[in-house]
Amino acid sequence: MIRNNWTIEEVHDLYNTPLLELIYNAATVHRQYNDTAEVQVCTLLSIKTGGCSEDCAYCPQAARYNTDVNVKALMQTGEVIDYAKKARDAGSTRFCMGAAWREVRDNRDFDRVIEMVKEVNKLGMEVCCTLGMLTETQAKKLADAGLYAYNHNLDTSSEYYNEVITTRTYDDRLQTLDNVRKAGVTVCCGGIIGLGETHDDRIKMLHTLATLPEHPDSVPINALVRIKGTPLENNPKVDIWDMVRMIATARLLMPATMVRLSAGRTEMSVSEQAMCFMAGANSIFAGEKLLTTPNPSFEEDNKMFDLLGLKPRVAFKDEKELVH
């Protein structure tokens, strides 16, 4: 049964289930709610790169850190559409556009993003944006343009959040999710592990996600990509079993949600990724870059899909099933 009233104790007990039993339980629930051979393939493009005023300790796009990221202005609509077509032809069904902004401003750049959303929508892809904080009115404008999903991650627990970010609050993030939901856009919201947080912080973040008014449509689980020049560059590599535990717990808490195996896949073997799929992951980002960090190529992922017997999920599947 899909529930939004999980207690923190219940989440704690699920998360701390012995690992093999946890994977088995999550795989069982995954089979009940989803086609386990089907994986949503998403592509994420940085449409405006670097120069961000925020201080997110993991992010190479923050202006205050000296990383190898060069500041680039907002891309032209035509360039973005060309990229979206290539992604679609390579097998992606969801196209996400990310801009390194603190928040959306009502200006010509936002007008151009609206145009991009309209044009990508015409390609038959689910359109997603991640543009920072936005108001309910701005969310409505994006919805009217055909936006399908909006990504805005919580990153970690509310208690640990200030150790990672000080330039906006946890409540700011929750408010943006609320604005998106009110506009009728599906919510994509997850977090990052490997920021220096405790297991309790991970449990609290999963509890927050699983007790939102509606479960997010998709929950990305990211392993920290350690970037030279950021405050977290020397953090230890995330253990694969920590990723599997997070994915399995997310699957049990939010049975019908897309659980996305996101950043960090370049440091995982095919067998390690296979464990994540078995534990309930059914979405990935494909293509060489995740905003500015490396990611496996479409060719590598196609080989993995062939080996594991996976197939890409079609776009707008939930809506198509409602029609039938």
Image: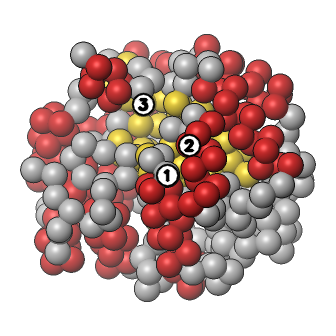
Any mark on residue 47, and which? Answer: none
- Count of picture labels: 3
Quarter of the C terminus within the rendering: top left
Residue 24 pos. (x, y %)? 13, 45
63 or 183, which is in the foreground? 183
Mark 2 sits on what residue? 143
Can residue 308 be seen in this snapshot?
A: no
**Residue 247 placement, left or right of 88:** left
Q: Which label's residue is closer to the chain start, 2 or 1?
A: 2
Give the residue displayed 73% in from the left and 34% down from the top.
116
Residue 306 pos. (x, y %)? 40, 15
Mark 1 sits on what residue? 183
Question: Is residue 26 depicted above or below 39 in this figure?
Answer: below
Q: Secondary structure at mark 1?
A: loop
Can residue 123 be seen in this snapshot?
A: yes
Q: Amino acid at mark 1?
A: Ala
Any mark on residue 40, and which? Answer: 3
Q: Secondary structure at mark 3?
A: strand
Give the residue displayed 31% in from the left and 55% down from the top.
215
Residue 132 pos. (x, y %)? 65, 61
Question: Is residue 190 depicted above or below 25 in this figure?
Answer: below
Q: Which label's residue is closer to the chain start, 1 or 3?
A: 3
Give the residue displayed 42% in from the left and 26% down from the top.
316
**Mark 1 neighbour density, 10 Å: few (under 14) some (14–19) many (20 or more):** some
Instruction: Give the Cα distance between marks 2 and 1.
Output: 7 Å
Q: Amino acid at mark 3?
A: Gln
Give the residue displayed 72% in from the left and 60% down from the top.
104
Question: Is residue 28 depicted above or below 314 in this figure?
Answer: below
Instruction: Give the Cα distance between marks 1 and 3.
Output: 24 Å
